[in-house]
Structure formats: C-alpha cells, structure tokens
Image (cartoon, rainbow, N blue to C red):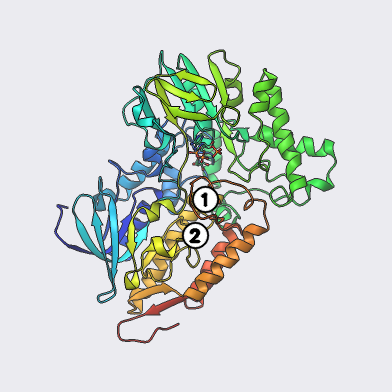
Amino acid sequence: RPPAADDRVDAVVVGAGLSGLYQLHRLRELGLTTVVFEAGDDIGGTWYWNRYPGARCDIESMSYSYSFSPELDQEWEWSERYAAQPEILRYIHHVADRFGLREDVALRTRVTRAVYDGADHRWRLSTDTGRTVTARFVIMATGCMSVPKDPGIPGVDSFTGAVHHTARWPREDVSFAGKRVAVIGTGCSGVQAVPVIAGEAASLTVFQRTPAYVLPARNRPLRAAERSALKAGYPEFRRAQRRSRGGTVFAPPTRSALEADETERTAAYEAAWEEGFLNGLVRTYTDILTDEEANATVAEFVRSRIRSVVTDPATAERLSPRTFPFATKRPCLGTGYYETYNLPHVALVDLRATPIERVTPRGIRTSDGEHDLDVIVLATGFDALTGSQLAVDIVGKGGVTLRERWAEGPRNHLGLVSAGFPNLFTVLGPLSPSVLTNITVSIEQQVEWITDCIGHLLRNGLTEIDATPSAEADWGTHVAELAARTLYPAVDSWYTGANVPGKPRVFLAYAGGLDRYREECDTAARDGYTGFTLSSPGAFPLS
Ligand code: NA7
C-alpha cells in the first residue's frame, strides 16, 4: 500500500520473522486489518539478518518449524538434521507465500515510536519512512536476539579493512580467500562461523574472552525414509512438543548425577555427546542445572573431550570453560569447532591474558602487540530480550515510557503485557520461557494466546486489556523464584543482562518450563484474564 499520512488499522505487528508472520496469519483469521512493519529489506527476522558463514539452527529442523498447519508439515522437505540459515529462510518465504502473508508486510520500515492515546484507546506509531499509523493493538514480534550489542571496542571505525557483525551480515557474498581474518567472540555465532571461515581464509585469529562449552552437532543429511517416518508421526509429535517442558520431545531423566558412579556417568555423557543434541547432556540427570556438584561432573567431561581433540595442550586449556557451570550460558552446537584449532593457519588469542587495547587502521592491538588483518568479524552478541523493545520509543498511559518503567529491569504480567501499556503485547519477550525453549513452540503458544485474548476483547465489546501492577509484581517475583532454583542467575550472561554494560541485572527468562507457563497463561485466560484489567469506554474495569 502507498504510504498514507495517518493510516488507521486494527493491529500493527512489529517484525516479520517467525513470530510476526504467524501473528499476522492469526489476526487475519479474526478479521483484523493488520500491517506488519519490518525494518529489513525482506522478511525472515533472525534468519534474514544472521546470514554469516555457518549460521545454522541448533534445534533439529523437523522440530524447529511451525506446527499450526498439518499440510505445511507434510509438504515441506528439510534436507538436513540441523537446517542452515538459507534453508530456514526459504522455509519462511514458502510459508509467507503459501498463506499470502506478504501483502500486509511493509518492508524497510522501522517503527521508531509508539504512543498510547488514552482518549481514543489507540496507539500512534511512527516509522523511519515517515509513515504513521494508528492501531488498537500492537504486537511486538521483534525477536529476543535482534539488537546487536555494541562491543565497545575503541577504534573499530578506523580499521581500513572490512568489519562485519554476524547479525548484520551483508547479503552479497563475503570472500575470505587469501585474507587475514579475525573473529571476536566465541558464543554460538562465533563457534559456527570459525570452522567455515577457517576453511577459506589465509589465516584466522580467534579472539576469545570466555570459552564456551561446544558440543558436536552431528549434523547430517536427512534420509528420505527418515523424513517420511517423522512425517507419519507428526500429529502426535506436534502434540507432544506442545505438552513438553522446552518444546522438544525427550524422555525426562529420573536420577541425580550424584547417585550414579563415575563409570555410569561417563557412559551417559558419552552417549549424549554422540547423539548431538543441544540439551543432550543436560538431560542425562535431573540436577545438572540445579546442583553445582552434579554440574561439575558434566563440565569436566566436556573439558576432557576438548583435550582429546585439540592437540596442543595449552590451546586445549585456553578453550576449556572453567569460569561458569555447564549450560548456564547457552551451550553451542558446533561442527568441527575444536578440530579447527589444530590447523596451522588458525590461532587463538586469550583476551583474559592479553586484552584488546583497540582496533587500529591495520588490525587489532592487544596488550601483546598488533595483529595485521584484512577482515574483522564481530560475533559479539546481542542486547537480548529487552533490547528490541526498548529500541522503540514506547510511551504508555500518562506519558510514561517503557524505558522508565523498565529502568530497573523488565516488568510485565505473564511475559506478555506491561502495566500501563494497554493492548501492547510481546512475543518472546522478557520473563517468558522464550530463549530457554525451542522458540517455534513458544511463538505459537504466545501468538495463539494473544489472538484468543484479542478475540475475547472484540467479542465482548471491550476496549482495553492492561496488566495490573500487583499481578506484574507477583509475576516478577515468581520468575525470579523459579530462576533462583537453578544455577543460571549467578552467572554473567545475556540471560542475566550482564553482557551489556549498564543493563540491570535480572534473570530475563521464565525457567519453570513451557508446559507450566502454558498452563499459567491458559488458567489466567480461562478465569477471565486474572491479573489483567479489561475495560470498555465508560464502563468500570471488569477485573
Ligand atoms: P553471545 O552468546 O552473546 O556471544 C558473544 C561472544 O562475544 C562471547 O564470547 C563474548 O564474550 C564475546 N564478546 C562480547 N563482547 C566482547 C568484547 N567487547 N570483546 C571481546 N569479546 C566480546 O552471542 P552469539 O551471537 O554468539 O549467540 C547468541 C545467541 O544467538 C545464541 O546463544 C543462540 O541462541 C542464538 P564473553 O562471554 O562476554 O566474555
């Protein structure tokens, strides 16, 4: 549609990734006029932006996909156990075409500001193209890892070679042939990029601050017979996913790691290592994420695997995580990651021993001297979970901004609505299970809840839903209590906001499991949206 001075729509969805596209599909079923604003040149969200070499999902492809359409499940053919970024992007395009979603997506349009007008109960949204719209409902489908973090390294602009952040990778091919390349950062993005870049570059230097626990992905092509068998079982599998704790299906462990002797434990860990699942090792025993001693047994197992792969003992030691328990930062699935450090043209710089002083026109200077480079890859992560919402200037009731409300950390009820910001919903936002789950399952759960809620408002002639401050406070306490039962909150990670200087330190995800979360959301809705105020003009709040 051509830009209008002041469009009126029923709903605005911010972001055309997996969340936003599904939200559009469901809002259309309610008959709402909806526009999706997408900052990128194309749809795809995370899978549009993160096109760095080696980018791949760490949840199996047959699980990491929409479940809402049995026909879609049957017709789409995944080629590999773990899908690479281009294939996931093709899948998203296929879904958009199949369900005719593109026509309501405005590309290259970033929402910059959203102001609630309490007089007519509408949000007024501004964009960087100058287009403005008003909408009754706003759904922030902005992703949980979509704002790249400024690494805060001085001198990056002075570098005369190329600099690429993994999450803002150019659409045209980046060639490393004959080049001296640096990768800064060894989280999941760096871990995926390193072996692929090493395969092409003249030299690769990896600048590591904190080593990750990297498990082998054991990726492989899916065989036709295997795909057919999985498809035959899809209906039951999808039901089981929805009931599951994290959006993936597995038999839960029954015993503590400390009840097993070392031989038994090692056998269990080896079996998980061979299987190649992100959470394979966490699922061996009940207390890997809750008991330091139990956790230490897995951490030591992973270090022993690193020592068995990396031939130089000093490099193996530098690659061995020792400063945080296993899986309290997201573990990584790698393909040939540790093996890469055995190659003669690959070097590892330990930034704890020799910190980066600055980027210079020629390369990177550490306390130990200068590294001459042609390309610098920043795999330095994101302002996770809250960053994408606070990037928009959101002004709620009474002129209060979301930035003010969240100054000491995010506040909302059920991870969905923040008090004072009526009819503004978040998918995969803070204080919901999002990043601790297979997010495709979380997306469907939250989008469906939001859609049902909007349907309820419309059917009952209600104007607004808002969270009550007391429900919001209780939810924050509940989320913190669930986290406190685990080893997560004590660790500096993007789960706790500690990777971004100045960000309030709060454990940002709901650690009680998607099954329990789903139950809490469904119960609130069934009981008349407890914890929320539903109101219509001139009427008293219903709850
Ligand atoms: P992560 O997991 O946040 O990793 C970022 C990495 O970059 C990590 O090793 C950081 O070290 C490092 N880093 C960040 N800033 C700097 C600076 N200034 N200097 C040196 N090193 C730095 O992001 P990813 O993109 O890898 O993965 C994010 C998630 O996306 C992933 O878990 C999947 O769920 C998808 P640190 O640990 O802070 O010492």
Considering depth in this image, is 200 or 418 the residue closer to the camera? 418
Q: Residues within 10 Å of mark 1 (few under 14, many from 20)?
A: many
Q: Cβ(mark 2) to ligand 1 < 8 Å?
A: no
**Of the residues shown, which amino acid type is indicated by label 2?**
Gly
Distance CA(mark 1)–CA(mark 2): 9 Å
Q: Which residue occupies 33% across, 81% down?
A: 536
Relative image position of residue 539 (x, y in whole percent): 34, 86
| Quadrant holding the C terminus | bottom left
Query: Which residue corresponds to mark 2?
Result: 409
**Residue 223 in view:** no
Q: Which residue occupies 71% across, 23% down?
A: 308
Q: Quadrant of residue 339?
A: top right
Q: Are marks 1 and 2 in contact (CB under 8 Å)?
A: yes
Relative image position of residue 510 (x, y in whole percent): 56, 58
Q: Secondary structure at mark 1?
A: loop
The label shown at residue 497 is: 1
- Residue 398 as seen in the image, left or right of residue 340: left
- Please, is residue 400 above or below residue 152 in the view? below
**Of the residues shown, which amino acid type is indicated by label 1?**
Gly
Considering depth in this image, is 441 or 333 the residue closer to the camera? 333
**Residue 67 in view:** yes
Counting residues from the start of the chain, the first of labels 1 and 2 encountered is 2
Q: Secondary structure at mark 2?
A: loop
